[in-house]
Every structure is written in C-alpha cells, then in structure tokens.
Image (cartoon, rainbow, N blue to C red):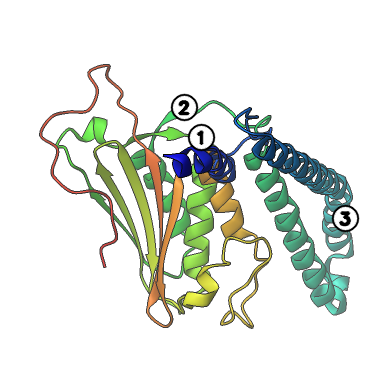
C-alpha cells in the first residue's frame, strides 16, 4: 500500500505526459499536483521544458508560413515573365526553347514545394482548421479519378465494399472536400510515379461500422521496412527512389491533411511488390436515425 501511494503520483504524471504526447494541442502543459514536493518540482520543471518546446515549435511554424507566403509572390512574377517571354519570342526562340522549358519546369517544381509547405502549415495549425463537414466520398472519388484517368498512363480500378445495402447512405464521412481531394490526388500521383508504365492502380472504398477507408494500392517499387518509419517526415525520400523526381513533401502533406480531418493513415509495402496507403475517416450518417442495423461483421483492415 505504501509503494502504491508513492508511485501513484508518478503514474498520474506519466499518464498525463503520454496524453500530451499523442494529442494535437496549442498549449502543452502538465496538470500540477500537491501530492508531494518532489513530484510538484518535477512537474514544474517539465512544464518549463514544454513551454520552451512550444515556443520553438511556434517559431518554426511562423517561419515556414512567412517564408512560404513570401516566396509565392516572386514565383508568380517569374511564371508570368517566363510565359510572356516564350510568347513574344515565338518562332525565333527555337534555340532558346529548351532553356525556357527547363526554367518553366523548375518554376513549377518550386511552386509545388511552396504550396505543399503552406498545406502542411494550415493543416497543422489549429487556428486555420475548419469545422468538419459531411462529404460524399464515393462521389468525390468518381469525379477525381475520372479527371485523372484522361492523362494517366496507368489503368485505375475503383472498387466499393459497403457493410450495408443502402448505397446512398454508405459513403458519407466527416472531413473537408478540397483537402480529401488533394490527399487522393497526391496518393494516386505517388502510385503513378513509382510504378512502371501500364501497371494498374487499385482504389478501394470500404465502409465498416463507424469508419470509412480509402485504400490506394500500386505494384511499384515498394518501400523498405526501414524507410517506412520515416516516409511521413518532411523532405525524406526512400533509399530506392534515386533518379525519380520528388520533393519528399507529398506524404507529409497527406498525413497532415488526414489528421486535420480527424482521420489516420496506414501503410503496407514490400520492395518490388508495391505499396498500399489506407486513409481511415469517421463516417457520417445523412439521416438522424444513425447507423443501420445488420452490418456485416469485421473491421477495416489490410487485404493482405
């Protein structure tokens, strides 16, 4: 009993620290305790450390946001100048055409980096987070995939699997329309980039109980087990991606956007066999009656 009384405050402190470590919050602080002077002093020291950490993170977010915004203006002007120069030179620009193309390609690449950084900032900043809204995910996938198919060198297969026969109510989830579309475009773009020509890309939409999952799977180069621990870190690129153009921001943006919608990202991959990313969101029921009875047993999981 004495041992339990001694370690109970430490257990409570450890539990509170774990909660802070796993939730998104603007104010990192452990609750103060009066159980003992030693635990109180430890809590004060940890809160001081958390305050410095919070200040550092805030400065990093402010810096990233400011730099990204400052870069957008010059990039826009450079793009306009590039287009105007190409138009005015016309046919006489034959010997400069390759240079203009390279310039244009690098400007577009820089634009993507800046836009991805801004997306990460807005998704991770509670001030910029919008209230979740109901989204018809099936309709969003139909529209998005149809627009991608026209320019895709890969066949894209869309499959649906619901736990209810009421199709009109099966495919609604809570999120943000634009953000979810960006997530789907990013993941399909990744699947295309790391797959050989004409390799199929499979998109699965599954509904189970209170969750809805979107899986995007390719048969590309895959990701090694050691790299999978870092793929959501900004600017990280896999050890087998040499020679393939990329910035290392696509997956961090996906993770930030999905988590801002209250969802999660799961990954399965094997080198030379392919990769599957699964986005899990909370379902929304259009009618006030809530989930229908008689749902099939089973939870959302990997097919492999």
Residue at 18 percent across and 49 percent down: it is 298
Spatial distance from mark 3 to mark 1, Cα to Cα?
A: 32 Å
Q: Earlier in the sequence, mark 3 or mark 1?
A: 3
Residue at 73 percent across and 42 percent down: it is 50
Whether 292 is drawn above or below 153: the answer is: above
Q: Is residue 226 visible?
A: yes
Whether residue 28 sits left or right of residue 12 in the image: it is right
**Label 2 neighbour load within 10 Å: few <14, some 14-19, many 20+:** few
- When asked about the image quadrant of residue 34, the answer is top right
Identify residue for label 2: 133
Spatial distance from mark 1 to mark 2, Cα to Cα?
A: 6 Å
**Label 1 neighbour load within 10 Å: few <14, some 14-19, many 20+:** many
Whether 279 is drawn above or below 45: the answer is: below
Identify residue for label 3: 78
| Rendered image: mark on residue 247 | none
**Residue 92, percent across and down?**
88, 72
Out of 164 and 158, give the one closest to the viewer: 164
Secondary structure type for disc 3:
helix
Foreground: disc 3 or disc 1: 1
Q: Earlier in the sequence, mark 3 or mark 2?
A: 3
Secondary structure type for disc 2:
strand
The reply to whether discs 1 and 2 touch (Cβ–Cβ < 8 Å) is: yes
In the rendered image, the residue lying farthest to the left is 294
| Rendered image: mark on residue 176 | 1
In the rendered image, the residue lying farthest to the top is 288
Q: Earlier in the sequence, mark 1 or mark 2?
A: 2
């Amino acid at each position: 009993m004495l041992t339990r009384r001694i370690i109970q405050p430490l257990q409570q402190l450890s539990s509170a620290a774990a909660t802070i470590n796993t939730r998104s919050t603007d104010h990192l602080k452990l609750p103060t305790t009066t159980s003992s002077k030693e635990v109180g002093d430890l809590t004060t020291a940890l809160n001081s450390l958390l305050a410095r950490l919070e200040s550092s993170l805030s400065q990093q977010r402010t810096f990233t946001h400011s730099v990204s915004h400052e870069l957008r203006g010059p990039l826009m002007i450079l793009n306009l100048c590039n287009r105007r120069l190409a138009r005015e030179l016309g046919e006489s620009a034959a010997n400069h055409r390759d240079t203009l193309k390279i310039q244009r390609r690098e400007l577009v690449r820089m634009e993507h980096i800046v836009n991805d950084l801004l997306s990460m900032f807005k998704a991770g900043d509670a001030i910029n987070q919008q209230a979740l809204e109901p989204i018809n995910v099936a309709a969003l996938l139909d529209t998005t995939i149809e627009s991608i198919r026209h320019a895709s060198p890969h066949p894209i297969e869309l499959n649906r699997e619901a736990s209810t026969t009421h199709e009109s109510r099966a495919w609604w989830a809570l999120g943000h329309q634009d953000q979810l579309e960006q997530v789907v475009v990013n993941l399909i773009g990744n699947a295309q980039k790391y797959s050989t020509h004409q390799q199929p890309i499979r998109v699965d939409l599954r509904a189970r109980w209170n969750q809805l999952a979107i899986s995007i799977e390719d048969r590309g180069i895959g990701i090694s087990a050691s790299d999978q621990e870092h793929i959501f870190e900004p600017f990280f690129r896999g050890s087998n991606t040499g020679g393939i153009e990329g910035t290392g921001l696509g997956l961090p943006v996906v993770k930030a956007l999905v988590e801002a919608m209250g969802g999660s990202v799961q990954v399965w991959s094997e080198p030379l066999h392919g990769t599957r990313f699964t986005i899990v969101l909370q379902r929304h029921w259009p009618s006030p009656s809530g989930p229908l009875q008689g749902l099939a047993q089973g939870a959302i999981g990997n097919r492999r």
